[in-house]
Amino acid sequence: MSKVLHKSFYLILLVFVAVFIASSLLVRAQYNYALYGDNPILGMQMWSIFLPVILLLLGSGVGLYALCLKLNKYSPKVVIPIVLLCSLVIQVIIIFVFPRVPTDDSQTVLSLAMNMLYDQDYSSFETGGYLHMFPFNYSIVLYLKTLLYLFPDNYLVIKLFNILFSTLTTFMIYLIYKQVNDRSTERDYGVLIFAATYLPSLFLNNLIYNDVIATVFLTSCLYFVIRFVREKSWKTIVIAAVFLALGNYFRSIGLIVLIAAIIYILLNMRSIGAKKVVISIGVLAMLFNVPTWTQNAVLQSSGAVSEPVGENAAPIYMWLNMGINLERFGFWDNMESYQIYQRQANYSKAKSTTLFKQEIGNKLSEASVSDLVQMYYKKIVWTWTEGTYQMDRYGIGNESSMGAGRGRGSGIAGSYSYTNAITELLQGDSVYRTGLLWIVYVMNFLMYCFIFIRLVGGIRRKRYDEASLVLVILGFIGFYILWEIKSRYIYPVYPLLVVLSYMGFKDTYDFIFHRKGTLERYSLRKR
């Protein structure tokens, strides 16, 4: 029964990945603020660019992989620190070359942190305030407030912590790979180097928000869940639960990982034992909301809030309502949903919930089946094949032609605290910026191709070692079919895509170049 379920999950993900690949052959998902503004774009695929970039990246990948194989003779104690240090240096260079200033929610949470630290101002929790509407963002406010208290008030400090978290994520990617691919007799430094130089993760350190910190915690949680299933150690499940609680505290998508972890543990009940399964699931569930409960208790006891936090927050139905939009297929609806909550419901959670349910019902009844199918297809394809996680806006930034944005938060696209020759070179829709976005986009496409190969291989061999990764990815796919979308929202899943795609690339390389020694060793270990 377990094998049947494993195979089913693999097949479901295989279908989605096939849709991503096939769709990319016909349409190109884009997010380019200079060209299209804050809009999701699905246009015709440009094969005159698409194919050459595919060939360029494939050729480069094969060459780099061959070089990585030569590192096998060196100790991990030497290679791993050097790779991580080089990645850290590259990330530091990027934040100096592209000194993007906070905008939108990023600027808001930073301003609130400063108000709370210097003025003891918690008025944002009052009716109409930002944290009244979105109390889940108090976690990042508290985090920023702590950094501002401990270190100088400087964007650079916050971004340097992003870099540390991003570098830790890179290390966790390597550890996860070694756990799920323990049959490999090689040291597989290639996956470490791939993760260390993955362009979206390098650039998104410029985003002062919760994405980078949540990603490292959720990725670490998954690593320790995998170790628990293999080692049956109580220590590993407790550590996993702590990381899961912290990841969910910073970004409220931890439920996806929790459900995936529970299913993964249940699938391995025979090897773990029923008693340990029940207790481990209990540990994950009990610690899940501890940070939020603690935060709310402290706020209420200190008198910082006059009513329970979240009592009249924007309901989840607001984002579900945003997720149903024929014109923008679930992308930000330009304040339409906000106005229902703010104006029609007067910031009442109960009233707005009723209004949103009515609105969702009206949208579903007025749209034809064909309209809905097209919308959800576009929604899935754009979210998962845009590929850059919107680093055009959140990582690179885009200085306006009016000059350097020296104030905090100038320009929705993300202006700079100063400009330089590189920012000028990548200005607007320049060929250099467009070329960089094409490279990241095609890299994402190729990752899906190699993930497809890996999934097919796993099904054929009837080995499902990557089931934990598959379950989390499926959870994200299912969630963002319903929710409001941004391609940035799936950033926490990039570590899993890196691991699976590298496995598929390695399988393909070994097959094409007839690395019989490796294949024979794999076969022997399989038996």
Image (spheres, rainbow, N blue to C red):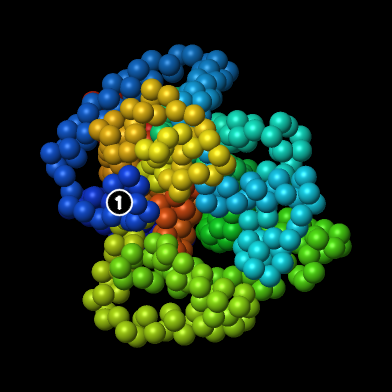
The residue depicted at 66 percent of the width and 73 percent of the height is: 312
Answer above or below: position of 332 versus 315. above
The N terminus is located in which quarter?
A: bottom left
**Secondary structure beneath disc 1?**
helix
Q: Is residue 17 visible?
A: no
Q: Residue at x 55, y 15 (%)?
A: 78
Instruction: Name, please, the residue furthest toward the left.
Output: 48
Relative to residue 436, is residue 496 drawn left or right? right
Q: Which residue is drawn at 40% across and 38% down?
A: 402
> In the figure, is residue 487 to the left or right of 351?
left
Q: Which amino acid does label 1 sit on?
A: Tyr
**Where residue 197 appears, x then y in whole percent?**
43, 29
128 sits left or right of 413 in the view: right
Which residue is denoted by mark 1 in the rendering? 36
The image position of residue 209, as x and y in percent, is: 57, 46
Seen from the viewer's position, the closer of residues 50 and 344 is: 344
Q: Nearer the viewer, residue 472 or 6?
A: 472
Q: Residue at the spot x=52%, y=47% of the render?
A: 103
User: Does residue 500 appear left or right of residue 172 in this picture?
Assistant: left
Q: Nearer the viewer, residue 129 or 75?
A: 129
Question: Could you say where residue 346 lies in the image, as x and y percent from the top left?
Answer: 61, 78
Q: Position of residue 259 (x, y in %)?
A: 56, 61
Question: In the displayed image of the protein, which residue is found farthest to the front?
Answer: 402
Whether residue 211 is situated above or below residue 9 in the rendered picture: above
User: Residue 64 sits in which quadrant?
Assistant: top left
Q: Can residue 63 be seen in this view?
A: yes
